[in-house]
Amino acid sequence: MTKAELVAKIAEDTDLTQAQATKALNSLLATMIEEIKDSGSINLAGLGSFTLITRAARTGFNPKTKEPLKIPASKSVKFKCSKTLKDSVNGR
């Protein structure tokens, strides 16, 4: 499902206009991003949790030349689905 399809579904289910649904979805996404950046995690009951993780710097290699290179430390987001979502996907 694309963002446009999600906006259309939200608009249909909530009797909002496409513009209102887009604004609501954009606000939700911006709020989630800010919360993950600020506190490091966000938990949504029935869906799962998003957690900020830090990857340490490491040494890798260029697959073409086999030359070693340094991969800098970085941050990423890990998602763990809830039991409710997992059971729903598995038809339970």
Image: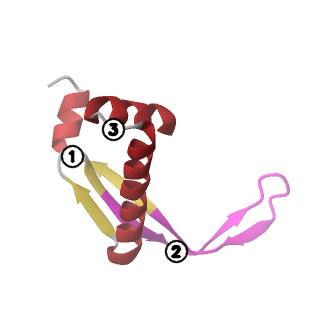
Residue bearing the label numbered 2: 56
Sooner in the amino-acid sequence: mark 2 or mark 1: 2
Residue bearing the label numbered 1: 82
Task: Please name whichever residue, 69 or 40, is drawn nearer the observer in this view of the structure.
Answer: 40
Horizontally, is 43 left or right of 34 in the view?
Answer: left
Confirm or deny contact between disc 2 and disc 1 (CB under 8 A).
Answer: no
Position in image of residue 10 (x %, y %): 34, 36
Give the label, 3 or 1, closer to the camera: 3
- In this picture the colour scheme is secondary structure
* Local SS, label 2: loop
Task: Please name whichever residue, 68 or 45, is drawn nearer the observer in this view of the structure.
Answer: 45
Residue 87 is inside the magenta segment:
no
Task: Please name whichever residue, 79 or 27, is drawn nearer the observer in this view of the structure.
Answer: 27
Residue 52 is inside the magenta segment:
yes
* Local SS, label 1: loop
Query: Separation of disc 3 and disc 1 at Cα?
Result: 28 Å
Give the label, 2 or 1, closer to the camera: 1
Task: Give the residue drawn at x 44%, y 37%.
Answer: 18
Query: Separation of disc 2 and disc 1 at Cα?
Result: 27 Å
Task: Please name whichever residue, 87 or 57, is drawn nearer the observer in this view of the structure.
Answer: 87
Number of the label disc, if any, that sits on residue 16: 3
Task: Give the residue drawn at x 30%, y 51%.
Answer: 80
